[in-house]
Structure formats: C-alpha cells, structure tokens
Image (cartoon, grey):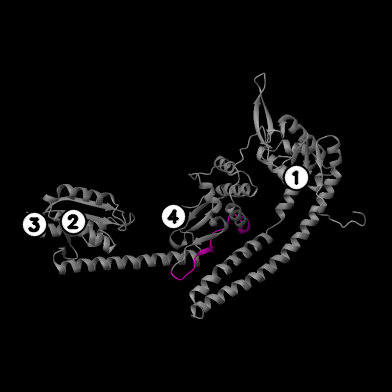
Amino acid sequence: MKRAIRYLRFSQLGQSNGSIERQELYTDQYIQHHNIQLVDTFIDRGKSAKTFDRPDFIKLQIFIAKHYKSVDYLLVDQLDRFSRDAGEAMNMVKQFQKKYSIQIVSVTEGITFDYDTPGSFFRAGLQLLLAEEDNINRSIKVRGGLYTARAKEGRFLTREKPFGYRKVGEGKERHLEINEEEAKVVRIVYDMFLRDLPLYKIKEKAYELGFDRKGNMAVDRVLANPVYAGLVRVEAFKDLPGGLFPAIHEAIIDKSSWQIVQGKMKKEDKVKVVVDDDIPLRGVLKCHCGVPLTGAPSRGKSGKYFYYYKCKHSKHNNISAIKAHEQFLNACDLMSISETNIKVIRNSCYSTIEIEMKVNKKKAVEKKHELDEIKQKLNTVEEKWFKDEINKDTYDRWYPIYSGQILNLEAAIERLSANQGKVFEVLDTNLDMLSDMRYVYTKSDTLQKREFVNMVFNKNLYYEKGIYRTPTMMDMLSHNANKMEEKGYLIYQKKRDTFSNIPQSGR
C-alpha cells in the first residue's frame, strides 16, 4: 500500500475554517479512492504563500528529510498551496521528487507532478503561473482600492489606531474620531517640542500624562505622523502620484504647527541638555566667551554639596549657583511692571490683536484666492495628462510642486483664520502677573524657567565679571535697566546695529 502525507493551508485568519475542511474533504476522497495510507497532516492557518517560512511547512520539510523512504506522495488540494510564486513552487516540488523521490499530487487539479514526464511538468508549471497571475491581479486590485480609499476618499486604513483617536463605525463607514483625553497629550507633546524643550523631557511628560505607546521612537512617530494634521500619507500607485492628501477625520494639530515641527525635526540634532532643578540655567546662561555654561555640584569641607555654573575653559566663569540665582531674582524684581503700565499694556495688546485679526482676515481671503488658482493649475495639469497632451515626466515634475503649495496655503489659511478669543482669555488671566516677576519665575518649573530666560533675553544671557549681561531684552521688562546695572544685577547693552527711529543729528 502506498503511503502519503498532506499539506493544507489558507492565507487569512479571518477566513472561514471551511477552507481547511474543504481541502481535507478532497484529499480524503483521493486517499480512499486510490487506497493510500495517510501518514501525517501538516496545516498552516493564516499563513501567506509569499514565503516558505511557515511553521508547519518547515515541519513538513523536516519530516520528509527524516522519513522520505517511507513516504510515496505529498498531497495538496492545489499546487498554489505551496507558493503563489511559480518559480519558487516549481523548485520546491522538483526538489521533493529528485532528492527524495516523493511525487507531488494536486488533488483537485488532477496533476501528479513527474519531472521526467513533459506533459506533467508543463501542466504543473501552467497551473502555478496561473496562480501567480491571479495573485498579481488581486494585489493590484487591493492596492488600487487602498489608493482610492486613502487619496480620493481620505480614509485612514492602518490597522492600529493612532494615539489620540478612536475608530468608530464599520466597513466603509469606519473612521477616526478624536479621543479628547489622549488628544490633550498629543497637543502638549507638540507644544513642548515647538518650545524647544529637550525631547527626553517631552517623553517623560507624555508618559506621565498617560501616553501608552512603547518604544524609544514612539513620541518621535507622533511628531512625524501627518494624521494629527488631518492628512493621510499615500504611496504612489501605477501612474498615480503619492504624497499627503486631505483626510476626512478631524485634525488635532493645525497644519501650520505640524509643518513647523517637520522642519525642526529635519535639522541636525542638538547637544542633549540634561535638566537639573538645582541649576535651571545650565545650557541657557552663557559665558562671556559665548560657550553655554555647564553646571555641577562641588563638595565642601562640611560634606555638603554646593552647585556652580562653569565654563569649559578653565580660567573663565566658575559661579556659585546661589549667588547667580539671587542676582537673577533681584533683576526679576526690577522687571516687574506697575499696575498703571499693565493697564496700558492690556489696552495696547487688545488694540494690536484686533488690528492683527483684521489684517489676518484680509490675508486669509488673499490666500484663498491664491489657493483656488493653484488648485486650478493642478487640475489643468491632470486634465492634460489624462488627455495625453503632456507626458508622465512633466506631470511628475509639476504635481509635487502644486500639491506642496496647496498644503502650505491651506496651513496658512488655517492659521490666519484661527479664533483669537483664546488670546484675550490668556491676557485677562495672566497679564496681572507681570506686577511680580520674581513670583512668575520662582513658581515656574525648571523647563518653564529656561523658557522664561530664553524668551526675555532672546537666548542672549551672558555672565561676566560677576554680573549678568545681555544685548537683547524684552522692551516692556527693560524699564529699570539702569537700576539693574547700578545694583550689580544685570547690564543691558542694547545692540546698536538697528534703530527704531533715524537720529536727527550726531553719530
């Protein structure tokens, strides 16, 4: 009696197990009809035919290598159960016959593969080529469908939902909806990155707030993902262009901010600055030579540690952190603004914002006209390409230019059309705090202190000969600059390369 083993496979775990049951039924009928003894069965569930790296197929090969002398046939429902790559499948079945003298039988196709029989070899090859062609056609249909769904319908089709969203609906109605609790974390991550906070601190804060994605690059991927700007990235398909396309889901981050973040991420990585609460000015305060000061503790005779800001050059600054911090707080006292001036600032800010809103509204209208013109140009290029009036190279040259301009204009319109009501709210809530700048600074955390210094002095705060120095300072906080210098806290030497008014006489 002849002996046989059989191999069964189906591709997707979502498919009905009836596929395996059908293969079992047909191979059982063949076994009974030809009076063959079944030795063993190998089944791969949910495994693609694109590779031979399948658990039970590997077991099958090991079994044949050990017991080939006691096996006459390897039964399959169809030859494409091996592989949908005709070349690979032919090599595999040839190997089984020539090396192990095992004949491959395709039950439903009625083929017993015999390498020494031309008709058998031709039929097997033809069936495998037809299977590969079918696989190619299905792949094209799938990729075409994905392109249409993403580029034309704006649907997000990735299996795993992005952090900040939830998936709702079924089938074609399935779409992303903002998960507000997670979206808050995404907005904070973008905001911190735009404020130049160290990336490791951004990651710490994100996980503290509930960010649950794993991996060292998880936060980086959030910053790079266009889905948060209401866009979907699409790969080119055949002659159709790839790139970023508008999506149907609501954006968490405005396009303008997202684009700024992409630009910042492309820049060379900065030297990592480790934030320490005891020396918040480390890396922010600079030596008179221009080198950012480092900071470290030094152990005193009593065993207690004292912090110092130091320059990497040995004969330059080595400042007691206690002294430096007290000097800075005293300077903050003199930066404080009187109640009368705060009222003036409030009124001035309101007027400025209202003027800016009007200007922005006008600019937004202009940008919309410009956007319509660019879209029309893109439509014209597409029409010419469809009518064969231009070649593919010309289309490929102009498409990314116009689509990039469209994305930039849409981001600008979104920014210019933003509701400024939040600005008035922030002013009303925080403007009175300008009357006590020491309080503002001391109540800030370390990252906020660093941002405060960089903003007030435009990243130009130096230390030389026991006193702070700066060529740039926020105008409304510099009203007591002479007193700061008299008391030995800060010297503000304004840059003389620019003047708001042309002098009437003299130098």
Say which label, 4 or 1, has the lower sequence index.
4
- Of badges 1 and 2, nearer the viewer stands 2
Q: Residues within 10 Å of mark 3 (few under 14, many from 20)?
A: few
Residue type beneath disc 4? Arg
Compare marks 1 and 2 and give the one earlier in the sequence.
Answer: 2
Residue 235 disc label:
none
Closer-to-camera residue (158/87): 87
User: First in sequence: mark 2 or mark 4?
Assistant: 2
The answer for how far apart the CA atoms under marks 1 and 2 are is: 77 Å
Magenta span: 238-257
Q: Amino acid at mark 1?
A: Val
Count of residue discs: 4
Q: Residue tagged by mark 1?
A: 456
Q: Which residue is mark 4?
A: 159
Seen in the picture, residue 308 relative to 342 is either above or below; the reply is: above
Find the residue positioned furthest to the left. 1
Residue at the (82%, 49%) spot, across then down: 345
**Label 2 neighbour load within 10 Å: few <14, some 14-19, many 20+:** some
